[in-house]
Amino acid sequence: MIIGREYEVRKLNEYYSSKSAELIALYGRRRVGKTFLVDKVFENRIFIARL
């Protein structure tokens, strides 16, 4: 569950639904949940490989 990130979730969903190719640079301080946000928003829609 994502709390307090409505704007970010909405923007990521807009980019995902876009008909054109999109490049998203997600940046911020350490340990604020960037990876968690991407994992939850794109869960069951895309595969992200981590090495």
Image (tube, helix red, strand yellow):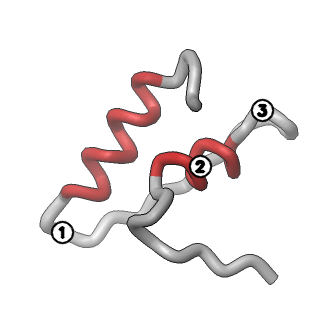
* Residue 40 x %, y %: 55, 48
Residue type beneath disc 3:
Val
* Residue 25 x %, y %: 55, 55
Circle 1 residue: 20
* Residue 12 x %, y %: 39, 46
If you read the primary sequence from the N terminus, does the residue marked by circle 1 or circle 3 appear first? Answer: 1
* Residue 42 x %, y %: 46, 57
Which element type, helix, strand or loop, lies under badge 1? loop
Which element type, helix, strand or loop, lies under badge 3? loop
Front one among 46 and 28:
46
Circle 2 residue: 26
- Circle 1 packing at 10 Å, graded few (<14), some (14-19), many (20+), is few
Q: CA distance from mark 2 to mark 1?
A: 19 Å
Circle 3 residue: 32
Which element type, helix, strand or loop, lies under badge 2? loop
> As drawn, which residue projects farthest toward the left?
19
Horizontal side of residue 18 vs 50, given as left or right = left
If you read the primary sequence from the N terminus, does the residue marked by circle 2 or circle 1 appear first? Answer: 1
Against 26, residue 49 (above or below) is below
**Tags 2 and 3 in contact by the CB under 8 Å rule?**
no
Against 27, residue 16 (above or below) is below
At a point 42% along the width and 35% down the height, the residue shown is: 9
At a point 59% along the width and 54% down the height, the residue shown is: 39
Residue type beneath disc 1:
Ser
